[in-house]
Image (cartoon, rainbow, N blue to C red):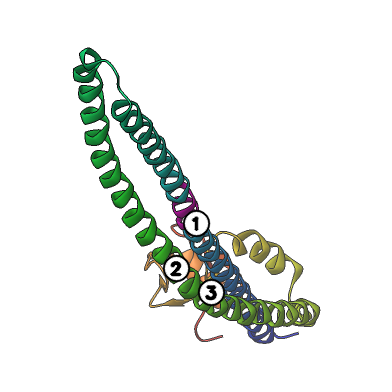
Amino acid sequence: MDKAVFFTNFVALVEFDNKIKLCKKSIAEEIQKIATLQNELVEYQTSVEDAKKQSTTLQQKVNFEENLLAEISKKIKALHTTINNLQAYKDYHALKQEFDLLCKQQVDQEQIVANTWDAFEIAEKNYKNLLISTANTNKLLEENMSVSEQKKAQLEGDLRNLYEQRPTYEVNIPQEWLNKYATMQSKVENPIVTVENGQCASCFYQLTGTDVQAIKKGALVQCKNCFRLLYGSHN
């Protein structure tokens, strides 16, 4: 068979393999999109859980501070009763000091309770708002993920079809060329290029006269600089 036909078939094989590479690249892009969307879903879920945890913690703190306030109030009430029923005046001064101290603690504790309630209400509002916004965002992310999953499945089907067709492109190509091509295919994006003005069309390395003549005779030569497979543009 004419070597020009060999080269035509060989170039067609390379172009077909480029379709396979493009398909695999598209699959990788969809996989990356899915991973990114999954990470975003986790981040949003984590933010909701953190907001809920903060709200719950503050609710517990409100309960704790209110219990402290109730205990102080109870002590004040009991001490007030004791002072009112006091028989010996000599004990009044000490009890009055204790009573005043408890009243001051009560005022301080009331402020703590108020501040804690404010913090809790803000946290609870933030949690509820985040819950609503995240639900909408999650829905959108899940829809986008579904689209990417469908694209990925379609591309994987296309890739299987391409692999099934590939053997037909290897017909009528010398085995020596196929072996060299298989070696180079995993190393560079475009493993086969033309020779232009005695130079590799990819890296512009100047070929020796011997290599140029060999290519003109239909040989498959490797560039000594970038190691790509070379063929004459006249073929």
- Mark 1, residues whose alpha carbon is within 10 Å: few (<14), some, or many (≥20)? some
Q: Residue at x 50, y 69 (%)?
A: 131
Helix, strand or loop at label 3? It is helix
Cα separation, mark 2 vs mark 1, equals 10 Å
Q: Is residue 148 magenta?
A: no
Q: Is residue 187 above or below residue 159?
A: above
The amino acid on which the numbered mark 1 sits, given as a three-letter code, is Lys
| Region in magenta | 50-57
Residue drawn at x 60%, y 68% is 31
Quadrant of the frame with the C terminus: bottom right
Q: Position of residue 22 (x, y in %)?
A: 58, 77
Q: Which residue is mark 1?
A: 52
Mark 1 or mark 3, earlier in chain: 1
Most extreme residue toward the front is 87
Q: Secondary structure at mark 1?
A: helix
Image position, residue 137 (x, y; %)? 50, 75
**N-term mark: 2 or 1:** 1
Q: Nearer the viewer, residue 33 or 228?
A: 33
- Mark 1 vs mark 3, foreground winner is 1
Residue receiving disc 2? 130
* 10 Å crowding of disc 3: few (<14), some (14-19), many (20+): some
Residue 20, located in which quarter of the rendered image?
bottom right
Q: Is residue 26 left or right of residue 126?
A: right
Q: Are marks 1 and 3 in contact (CB under 8 Å)?
A: no
Residue that carries the numbered disc 3 in the rendered image: 135
Q: Give the spatial CA distance, label 3 vs label 2.
A: 8 Å
Q: Which secondary structure type mostly characterizes the magenta part of the structure?
A: helix
Identify whether 64 is placed above or below 213.
Answer: above
